[in-house]
């Protein structure tokens, strides 16, 4: 009779002996693998615990840098632009050239006036020396002073003509501005009346809300135009006042110069040696010396203005937001381009619960999202005194409504300790992942 499967299994186990009936843990290889797995699991757990207690990291971190607005310091026309967007420049590199013709002429005029003042100073000193010796020398000096006074009168008369022309031009500008203001005032009154009428019609449901909004918008726009026209009138009035003040000051100087001519004529007629003449010459020398110092300052200012026509890079970095082209007329303070400095750092927004053991000076390993293979080294520079939300445009008001506690983030500044590698485009706003060693 054939054997059943159970009997065949028992027979096989009996024939194979005790080796086939061993448990899996009785196998040496299985025991080794189990021990190795336990060791690896413990090692991984210890490593994870060590990482969590030794390092603090966040992905809310970005590269920051100094962004410098490049602006001219003088008025002028752009002659040449030597850079383009995203171009790297070194400190002192020439960026923009303005037309220097006007400033060269002003510098030449200032230097000529300085030479004239120096010549006058030499003449005044020579006259003082001669006055102390002989009367004839005093007479010659008086004649020279008379000639200088006449030249001064002629120059001031020319300046008075220019000042009169400036007053007329300022008056014309004022009249034009007043005419614009009158037109803007009439337009503003009309728009305000329309808005009031539409508001009354809207309250009676005779016009739509859109028509009322359009009328009120037009009223506000015309009111803004009227304000701008008022400002233009005020500016024109200020220009006219300055022009009149210049005319009055020039007229006063002319009268003073004419008085000086008369005094010089009297000194020529009554020239004689004596202490009075010596003291007068001394005063004249002092006045000329003061004029020389003033003219030197004017020459220095003219030299500075001429140097400002060549705009150079204040730091090394990359050019961005270039908005200037040759031929543009630029004003002082006008933004021509932005310079992103090579001085970069990292601002990492850590949770406030991560700051317990964080201190300035701790080493940091920085990974850049754009270059996963790049690892940079840095250190904690400083920790901001306050959360980022507290310094936002609209900080939270926790005393109002229902309060829900939210873990805040605090900006931490991290600086690079090694020079940034070449060949990698790193700039403000790029995402990074810093890992700070806090133990």
Image (spheres, rainbow, N blue to C red):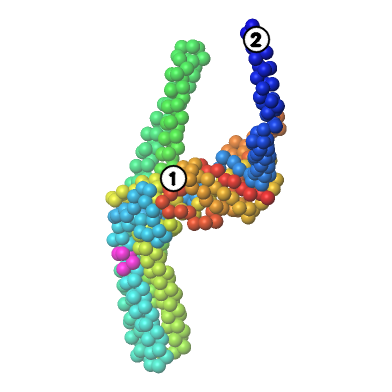
Q: Relative to the observer, which residue lies in front, 292 or 270? A: 292
Q: Residue furthest bottom?
A: 133
Say if the magenta span includes residue 168. no
Residue 4's disc is 2
Query: Circle 2: is it few (<14), some (14-19), or many (20+) Cα within 10 Å?
Result: few
Image-based side of 79 in relation to 24, left or right: left
Compared to 12, does 433 lie above or below?
Answer: below
As displayed, is residue 92 above or below residue 137? above
Residue 106 magenta-drawn? Answer: yes
Cα distance in 3D space between marks 2 and 1: 119 Å
Q: Residue at x 42, y 35 (%)?
A: 225
Image coordinates of residue 233 in percent, x first then y, are 41, 43
Quadrant hosting residue 259: bottom left
Q: Quick check: 58 left or right of 71?
A: right
Badge 1: residue crowd in 10 Å (few <14, some 14–19, many ≥20):
some
Q: Position of residue 247 (x, y in %)?
A: 38, 59
Residue interval drawn in magenta: 104-108
Magenta region, main secondary structure: helix
Q: Is residue 204 visible?
A: yes
- Give the mark toward the camera: 2 or 1: 2
Residue in front for this viewpoint, 315 or 105: 315
- Residue 345, given in percent of the width and then of the height, sits at 53, 51
Q: Where is the N terminus found, in terms of image quarters?
A: top right
Residue drawn 67% across the image and 40% down it: 39
Of residues 18 and 145, the one drawn nearer to the viewer in this rendering: 18
- SS label for mark 1: helix
Mark 2, secondary structure of its residue: loop
């Amino acid at each position: 009779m054939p054997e059943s499967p159970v009997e065949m299994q028992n027979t096989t186990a009996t024939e194979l002996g005790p080796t086939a009936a061993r448990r899996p843990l009785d196998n040496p290889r299985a025991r080794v693998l189990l021990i190795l797995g336990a060791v690896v699991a413990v090692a991984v757990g210890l490593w994870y615990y060590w990482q969590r207690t030794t390092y603090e990291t966040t992905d809310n971190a970005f590269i920051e840098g100094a962004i410098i607005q490049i602006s001219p310091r003088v008025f002028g026309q752009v002659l040449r632009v030597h850079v383009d967007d995203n171009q790297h420049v070194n400190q002192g590199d020439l960026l923009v050239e303005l037309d220097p013709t006007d400033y060269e002429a002003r510098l030449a005029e200032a230097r000529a006036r300085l030479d004239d003042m120096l010549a006058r100073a030499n003449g005044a000193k020579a006259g003082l020396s001669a006055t102390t010796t002989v009367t004839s020398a005093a007479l010659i000096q008086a004649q020279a002073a008379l000639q200088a006074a006449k030249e001064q009168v002629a120059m001031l008369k020319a300046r008075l003509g220019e000042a009169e022309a400036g007053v007329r031009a300022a008056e014309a500008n004022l009249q034009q501005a007043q005419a614009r203001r009158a037109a803007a005032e009439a337009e503003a009154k009309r728009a305000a009346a329309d808005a009031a009428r539409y508001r009354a019609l809207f309250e009676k449901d005779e016009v739509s809300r859109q028509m009322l909004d359009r009328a009120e918008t037009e009223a506000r726009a015309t009111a803004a135009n009227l304000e701008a026209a008022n400002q233009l009138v005020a500016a024109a009035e200020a220009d006219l006042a300055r022009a009149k003040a210049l005319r009055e000051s020039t007229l006063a100087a002319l009268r003073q110069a004419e008085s000086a001519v008369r005094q010089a004529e009297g000194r020529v007629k009554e020239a004689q040696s004596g202490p009075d003449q010596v003291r007068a010459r001394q005063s004249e020398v002092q006045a000329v010396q003061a004029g020389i110092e003033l003219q030197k300052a004017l020459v220095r200012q003219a030299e500075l203005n001429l140097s400002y026509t060549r705009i150079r890079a204040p730091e090394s970095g990359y050019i961005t937001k270039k908005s200037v082209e040759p031929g543009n007329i630029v004003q002082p303070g006008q933004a021509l381009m932005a310079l992103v400095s090579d001085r970069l750092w990292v601002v990492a927004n850590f949770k406030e619960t991560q700051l317990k053991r964080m201190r300035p000076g701790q080493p940091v390993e920085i990974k850049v999202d754009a270059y996963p293979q790049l690892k940079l080294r840095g250190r904690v520079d400083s920790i901001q005194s306050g959360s980022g939300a507290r310094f936002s445009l609209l900080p939270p008001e926790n005393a109002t409504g229902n309060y829900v506690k939210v873990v805040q983030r605090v900006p931490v500044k991290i600086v690079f300790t090694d020079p940034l590698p070449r060949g990698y485009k790193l700039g403000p706003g790029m995402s990074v992942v810093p890992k700070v060693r806090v133990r």
